[in-house]
Amino acid sequence: MRVLVPSTGLYTYPDVIVVCGEPRFDDAEVDTLLNPAFIAEILSPSTEAYDRGRKFEHYQAVASLQEYMLIAQDRMHVDLFTRQPDGTWLLRGFTRAHDAIELASIACRVTLGELYEKIELS
Amino acid sequence: MLEWWSAVSTQPKTFLTPEEYLELERKAEIKSEYYRGETFAMSGASREHNTLGVNLVSSLHQQLRGKPCEAYKSDMRVKVSPTGLYTYPDVIVVCGEPRFEDAAVDTLLNPAFIAEVLSPSTEAYDRGRKFEQYQAVASLQEYLLVAQDRMHVDLFTRQPDGTWLLRGFTRAEDTIELASIECRVTLGELYEKVELS
């Protein structure tokens, strides 16, 4: 699903998106989402700087976005950024298989054990 | 300035103990970082990188006069004790009594504030694994990331529950409040004489 960040003009395909309530689209093609509540990106060496830096800045400009999750693929490590009422973001890191990631914006939870099931870590 | 992913080792395949690293490092002409037996040579930095570092450290130095805090730039080695990383942050501030690894007083253990100026080759490391390492330094309260290609600063502040609060700054008149060291700097000051691409 393509996402448009209207205020910056970026069109991008996040790895995972959750939208809650009525999805809003850019036009009648209904293939370009405007109001994600949750976005996750799986980090790669070539995109980690972008995902953690400028891309996250773009996502911050999406008013509907409440949580942004970054997933390492070379070790068990997840960073969850949660939007605060004052516009700052709270970062919480997770590293153990029994850690449960609580995604408050979408009332979901996932453990790292689940997330990394069948992943061969280097 | 460490090339994390390309892992340019100055001592290829030679495992060094921390003691061997420190002994070599104290005689070396080029600085290297160290992690788990390997050393990583550090490259020089761009004009913008240097100017940002100097602007920040000189502003902090000025504000810390008469206070029990000291600012260092680029040449103070920090040891992340829980993980064993030795690294040279771009800017460090220590408050109260600095604690060092040994009598050589060149390897700081208790920074309160660290800033890194971002480069394309190190941004992923500085935002990712290096930040994770720094999070393991109990004394560290604030971590500042400074872009050199545009006016943008991210400040991470440690919260009592172990999470970190991220605040972004993008305008020349924005003031970064560094609560842990009681300093403040505007983006205008920080980016003075920096040519943005």
Image (cartoon, coloured by chain):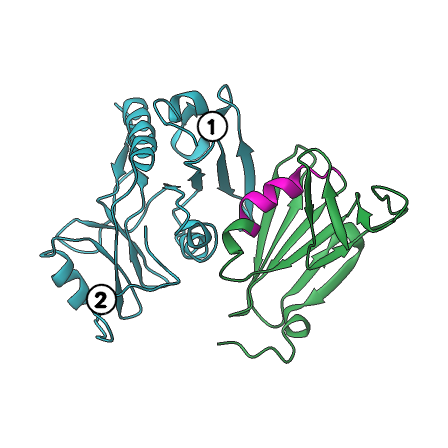
Chain colours: A green, B cyan
In the figure, A26 relative to B80: above or below? above
Q: Is residue A95 visible?
A: no
Q: Earlier in the sequence, mark 2 or mark 1?
A: 2
* Residue B47 visible in the shown view: yes
Q: Is residue B60 magenta?
A: no
Looking at the image, which is closer to me, B17 or B129?
A: B129
Q: Secondary structure at mark 2?
A: helix
On screen, residue B103 versus residue A14, left or right, reads left
Chain under disc 2:
B
> Furthest-front residue in view?
A29
Q: Position of residue B180 (x, y in %)?
A: 42, 35
Question: In the depicted view, which residue is nearer to us: B194 or B102?
Answer: B194
Tell me what residue is drawn at x 52 percent, y 24 percent.
B171
Q: Chief secondary structure of the magenta span?
A: helix
State the extent of the magenta-drawn residues as a range. A51-63
Query: Which residue was labeled with disc 1?
Result: B177
Q: Is residue A71 left or right of residue A110?
A: left
**What is the x, y in percent for residue B158?**
50, 44
Asked whether B35 or A86 is in front, the reply is: B35
Residue type pointed to by label 2 = Pro
| Subunit bearing disc 1 | B
According to the picture, the residue beneath numbered tag 2 turns out to be B18
User: The residue under label 1 is which amino acid type?
Assistant: Glu
Give the farthest residue toward the top: B173
Residue at the (48%, 21%) spot, across then down: B172
Identify which residue is drawn at 17% across, 61% down. Answer: B22
